Amino acid sequence: MTATTSLDPTGLVDPAVHAAGAQHEIWRWMREHSPVHRHEPTHLPAFWSLTRYEDVRAVYRDPGRFSSASGVLLRPTRLREDPGAGMTLALTDPPRHKELRNTVADWFTARSVRALEDAMRGMVRAVLAQAVEAEEADFVHDVAGRLSIYTIGHMMGVPEPDHETLFRWTNEAFEAGVSLAAHQELMLYFIDLMDRRTANPADDLVSMLLGGTVEGELLTEEEVLLNCENLVGATENGRLALAGAMQAFLENPGEWERLREDRSLLPSAVEETLRWTSSATHSMRTATEPITLHDQRIARGDKVVVWVPSANRDESIFPAPFTFDISRKPNRHLALASGEHFCLGATLARAQARILLSELLDSTEKIEPAAAPTPVHSIAVNGPEHLPVHITGK
Ligand code: HEM
């Protein structure tokens, strides 16, 4: 599948266009000329594209008119509805959504994340020590991926000796571009973990889901399992954002030196890496009523897709949006969404980035590209699939 011209919006459904970095020119054109753009059916259903910051934000903040319950990602028409529809955190609407979110929200508060910081710092030190010793690493696989999966494994109550296996299985699924639900060993592992926690509840996410009630009813086994999958799957964004942050600094070494010189820039640097990477490429919603937007008439039941990296490069909101500036302020990016479905892992993702960057500055003298990065091929997430680096320790 190839777009006819470099500015052809139909190119947005082609992972190769995203991998080649050609999507930003298309979005720039759409923000200016076609902010509510109709895509006719291909292997995907028909949908509307929104590319401007204000429109993307408004959709995220209006779950009443823009429903998540039948899916939040574009799926080929030949596939059935998303198996988590109406059941997982990401795929439910209020009021059910809020109750479901409350069953696990405690684990994601600032206080809970602070309590995890020592454990995360320990994980970062261990993975960096290995990379420094080897003097080279695939930053995606060896550093960002391990950190993301080990952390969620720890939170879910996966025993530490199994973290590496969990990491291998999730990698197999992510690399094959299939959902985690399609990975049988992983799903069987979670079913077994659920059985163990039903017998012996512990202080972890799986036990919380098992004990959680929505509308006065315990979650079914299927709902618990699908929510486990949702939580582990959501960390793919974390991995891509951390690795994308490293890539941004490798491509802008002046900003890395700035951060080395002035650590007070760390919080704004983390926000800028989130804006810059915008690793969740799109979210989809279904209109629950007819909506007119910029003179276009969206019908009830129509699919509406918001493109997050486009919103975060909107020139009417961000001065010099294509400049990676670690002191950017204000920086009200939408990388973690907004409103009802605001990323549950936001505080965690920010803490991981802060810890990883500060440990990198502390423990390394130099980090350089060892080869060109390979991008992921996807229209749902973006970032490096592989990021080979040379690392020199202090
Ligand atoms: C920097 C990395 C991350 C990015 C860019 C990101 C982005 C997002 C976005 C855009 C959404 C909204 C999706 C939608 O409503 O259609 C979301 C939701 C969510 N994220 Fe993240 N995420 C990140 C890291 C994480 C991590 C580490 C976790 C931890 C488990 C996580 C868990 C979730 C969950 C469970 C939801 C669904 C929340 C709900 O529907 O109430 N995310 N994330």
Image (cartoon, helix red, strand yellow):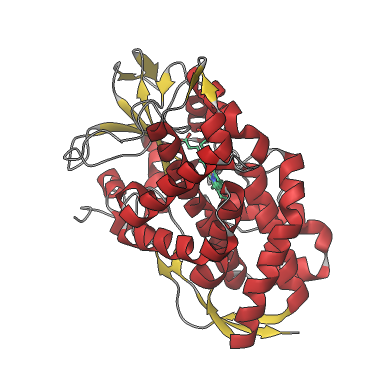
Say which residue appears at 60% left-offset and 55% top-offset: 151
Say which residue appears at 67% left-offset and 34% top-offset: 106
Residue 281 visible in the shown view: no
Q: Is residue 352 above or below residue 139?
A: above
Q: Quadrant of the N terminus?
A: bottom left
Where is residue 330 shown, x and y percent of the image? 71, 42
Residue 21 or residue 383, whichever sits in front: 383
Where is residue 343 shown, x and y percent of the image? 56, 38
Query: Which residue extends farthest top?
Result: 289
Query: Which residue extends farthest front?
Result: 199
Say which residue appears at 55% left-offset and 65% top-offset: 161
Residue 271 or residue 346, whichever sits in front: 346
Say which residue appears at 51% left-offset and 51% top-offset: 235
Q: Quadrant of residue 76?
A: top left
In-image side of 266 versus 87 (left or right): right
Q: Is residue 272 above or below residue 131?
A: above
In-image side of 192 versus 363 (left or right): left
Q: Quadrant of residue 369?
A: bottom right
Residue 382 visible in the shown view: yes
Where is residue 70 shown, x and y percent of the image? 33, 27
Residue 385 or residue 271, whichever sits in front: 385
Q: Quadrant of the C terminus?
A: bottom right
In-image side of 222 versus 341 (left or right): left
Q: How many marks?
A: 0
Where is residue 393 shown, x and y percent of the image? 71, 84
